[in-house]
Image: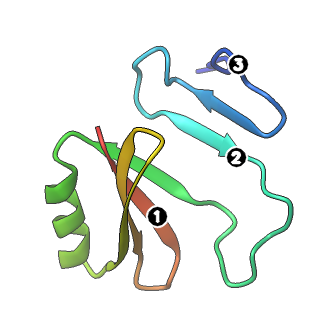
Amino acid sequence: MNRPLDENASAEFATVGMTEGNAPVLMFIQVPDKTPGKNVIHLDLKAADWREQIDRAIGLGAKHIGDFDEYGTQWATLADPEGNLFDIAAG
């Protein structure tokens, strides 16, 4: 299935599916250089029961890195057992 970029996409930031209300929503953010020790692909997951999903991920072996509240969104950053970072956001 091909899905177009959402409106207001730029070379630095774009989303797919955010305005359609479809899942999964994909977000692309350009970074100047790869950060050493950080994974190339960073998943941001969204869940209505996000605190429960955070607890579930921790129960499955994830490490809770921190909680954030910026740009009108709340999320937690976690690391999988291999150290790859991912976020679970309130939705």
The three-letter code of the residue at mark 3 reads Asn
Element under disc 3: loop
**N-terminal of the two: label 2 or label 3?**
3
The three-letter code of the residue at mark 1 reads Phe
Question: Percent x, y for residue 57?
Answer: 25, 69
> Residue 47, relative to residue 83: is it above or below?
above
Q: Between tags 3 and 1, which lies in front? A: 3
Element under disc 2: strand
> Residue 44, relative to residue 24: is it above or below?
below
Dot 2: few (<14), some (14–19), or many (≥20) neighbours within 10 Å?
few
Q: Left of 72 or right of it: where is 32?
A: right
Dot 3: few (<14), some (14–19), or many (≥20) neighbours within 10 Å?
few
CA separation, marks 2 and 3? Answer: 13 Å
Q: Which circle marks residue 19 in the picture?
A: none
Dot 1: few (<14), some (14–19), or many (≥20) neighbours within 10 Å?
many
For image coordinates 40% across by 85% down, the residue present is 81
**N-terminal of the two: label 2 or label 1?**
2
Instruction: Tell me the quarter of the image containing the N terminus.
Output: top right
Instruction: Tell me the quarter of the image containing the C terminus.
Output: top left
**N-terminal of the two: label 3 or label 1?**
3
Looking at the picture, tell me which residue is in the foreground, 79 or 13: 13
Q: Which circle marks residue 29 in the picture?
A: 2
For image coordinates 80% across by 70% down, the residue present is 34
Element under disc 1: strand
Looking at the picture, tell me which residue is in the foreground, 62 or 29: 29
Q: Between tags 2 and 1, which lies in front? A: 2
Q: Which circle marks residue 8 in the picture?
A: 3
CA separation, marks 3 and 1? Answer: 25 Å
Question: Percent x, y for residue 70?
Answer: 45, 49
Q: Give the quadrant of residue 2.
A: top right
Q: Which residue bears the numbered disc 1?
A: 86
Q: Left of 32 or right of it: where is 41?
A: left
